[in-house]
Image (cartoon, rainbow, N blue to C red):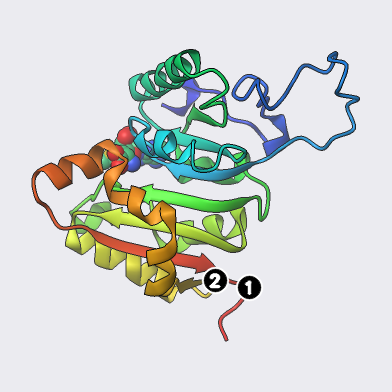
């Protein structure tokens, strides 16, 4: 249950110096007079699983802070250990990625301020096939309101799945939502992040090994539809 992990009441309650010590030097250091505004997380990988996307993105955007949100305790611990091991083996690298254990369906607004994020990822989310379980899907019109709140105007939401029905569902929720519009195909081809969607995560690699098809929907947060 949710009582087993701490949840910030508001985003400012999070102490990110634990997550990103390299980017949050202790207040007593000489070159930090305490006046610089704290850096903010810009990318969120929702249901990050074993963290493959974060590990793939980290060197592409070394100055951008990114966080994975994962519900399973053991998986979250694994990602923490994985990041610490990468940092130890590659000094100065992988300092910009971290993970929190949380239920993203309930707590996204507790972690992110309005317009804080520039990218959100939903890679191979659980399909919840039965109609009565559709309300458990991590993309829905209601949850898109929360994601639209956390994303800046111009920010991008990336989704991918190997389940065609879920792919249709995610695309139609995004299509129907007034604050998202599809990113044109030419732009996707030029976006280095798009390649990682199917290749970087553990689930994506499994699908690729089995020769499975994938269904992608990538949408931009807009201020309102024309
Ligand atoms: N994105 C990863 C990948 O592509 O390899 C993991 C995909 S896995 C099929 C879905 C993940 O979402 C699982 O690790 C699961 O624990 C996590 N998850 C499911 N519901 C969640 C929720 N409400 N909040 C956070 N994580 C959740």
Quadrant for residue 26, please give it: top right
Q: Mark 1 and 2 residues: CB-CB less than 8 Å, in contact? A: yes
Q: Residue, x 33% and y 30% (percent of image)?
A: 50
CA gap, disc 1 to disc 2?
6 Å
**In the shown orientation, is residue 34 left or right of residue 38?**
right
Q: Is mark 1 within 8 Å of ligand 1?
A: no
Q: Secondary structure at mark 2?
A: loop
The percent position of residue 182, horizontal first and vertical second, equals 43, 73
Mark 2 surroundings: few (<14), some (14-19) or many (≥20) residues within 10 A = many
- The image quadrant where one finds ligand 1 is top left
Along the line of sight, which residue is nearer the eye, 65 or 77? 65
Q: Measured along the vertical axis of the image, is residue 211 above or below residue 82?
A: below
Residue at the disc numbered 2 = 179
Q: Residue, x 66% and y 34% (percent of image)?
A: 9
Q: Residue, x 51% and y 60% (percent of image)?
A: 156
Q: Secondary structure at mark 1?
A: loop
**In the shown orientation, is residue 126 left or right of residue 157?**
left
Q: Measured along the vertical axis of the image, is residue 213 above or below residue 12?
A: below
Q: Is residue 136 visible?
A: no
Residue at the disc numbered 1 = 223
Q: Measured along the vertical axis of the image, is residue 58 above or below residue 135?
A: above
**In the shown orientation, is residue 214 left or right of residue 192?**
left
The percent position of residue 112, horizontal first and vertical second, equals 63, 44
Q: Residue, x 63% and y 31% (percent of image)?
A: 8
Q: Quadrant of the N terminus?
A: top left
Mark 1 surroundings: few (<14), some (14-19) or many (≥20) residues within 10 A = few
């Amino acid at each position: 249950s949710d009582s087993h992990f701490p949840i910030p009441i508001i985003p400012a309650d999070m102490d990110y110096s634990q997550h990103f010590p390299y980017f949050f030097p202790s207040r007593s250091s000489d070159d930090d007079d305490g006046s610089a505004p704290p850096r903010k997380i810009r990318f969120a990988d929702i249901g990050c699983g074993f963290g493959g996307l974060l590990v793939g993105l980290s060197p592409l955007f070394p100055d951008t802070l990114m966080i994975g949100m994962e519900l399973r305790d053991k998986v979250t611990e694994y990602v923490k250990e994985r990041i610490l091991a990468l940092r130890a083996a590659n000094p100065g690298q992988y300092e910009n990625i971290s993970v929190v254990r949380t239920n993203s369906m309930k707590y996204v607004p507790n972690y992110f301020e309005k317009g804080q994020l520039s990218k959100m990822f939903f890679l191979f989310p659980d399909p919840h096939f039965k109609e009565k379980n559709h309300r458990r899907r991590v993309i829905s019109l209601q949850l898109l309101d929360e994601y639209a709140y956390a994303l800046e105007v111009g920010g991008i939401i990336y989704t991918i799945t190997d389940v065609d029905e879920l792919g249709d569902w995610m695309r139609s929720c995004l299509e129907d939502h007034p604050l998202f519009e599809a990113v044109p195909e030419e732009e996707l081809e030029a976006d280095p992040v798009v390649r990682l969607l199917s290749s970087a995560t553990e689930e994506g690699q499994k699908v690729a090994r089995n020769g499975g098809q994938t269904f992608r929907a990538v949408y931009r947060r807009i201020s309102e539809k024309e």
